[in-house]
Amino acid sequence: MDNICRIMLDIETTGKTPGCNILSIGATTFFCPQRTNFYRGIHWDNLNPDFCNETDTMEWWREQKQEVAAAAFGGKNTYCQALQDFTNFIHERQRGHSGLHIYANGAAFDFPILEYAYKAVGLNIPWNYFERQCYSTLKAHFQRVPKPKFEGNKHDALHDAINQANHCEAILKFIS
């Protein structure tokens, strides 16, 4: 295959719109010889006070498995540290590659929320607009490629990213 660095990301949040708090960021590389994972949870006390917690999403979290919700709200990092670590993860993975494709399950969710957060804390967004890829579009167009069995806990940002990457990789193999 080509020499593109491919990363699948997933976030867990307290809402669905830019300006909501991010609870955790999970990511994994794929279509490469060795996968590398990234996970940072943001400590509840360190959530940005200028950001919001949307009532319907907070209610939704109360309905999730207790251990999954506890993990989502049990982060240890500050906002700035989690975002800076994610930037470093992306830049380190890009070394030696001719480009970056960063995927998310819904271009209208993860990217706008993360980009808002990066701007709000004064950090540069670690990707260009043309490097963003939409996994949900791929899976909608290639429904005949089955999703592998889900491993781990749903709504854990890293587990979601890994499972999404497994399916995305299967789709990309199918169409190449």
Image (tube, grey):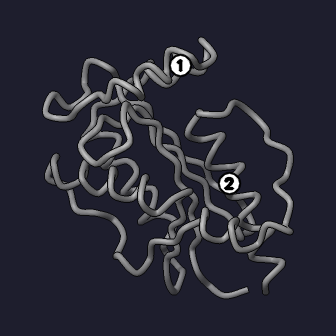
Residue at x-position 34% and y-position 76%: 128
Residue 156, above or below 6: above
Residue 147 sits in quarter: bottom right
Kind of residue sitting beneath label 1: Ala
Residue displayed at 33% across by 24% down: 55
- The residue under the point 74% across, 33% down is 152
| Residue type, numbered disc 2 | Gln
Quarter of image, res 15: top left
Residue 172 image point, x, y percent:
74, 76
Residue 43 horizontal/vertical position (percent): 34, 23
Q: Which residue matches tag 1?
A: 69
Residue 144: x and y, percent?
86, 68
- Label 1 vs label 2: CA separation? 20 Å
Residue 81 higher or lower than 119, as above or below: above
Mark 1 residue crowding within 10 angstroms, few (<14) / some (14–19) / many (20+): some
The answer to which of marks 1 and 2 sits earlier in the sequence is 1
Quadrant where the C terminus is found in the figure: bottom right
Side (left or right) of 120 relative to 28: left
Q: Return the residue at label 2.
A: 164
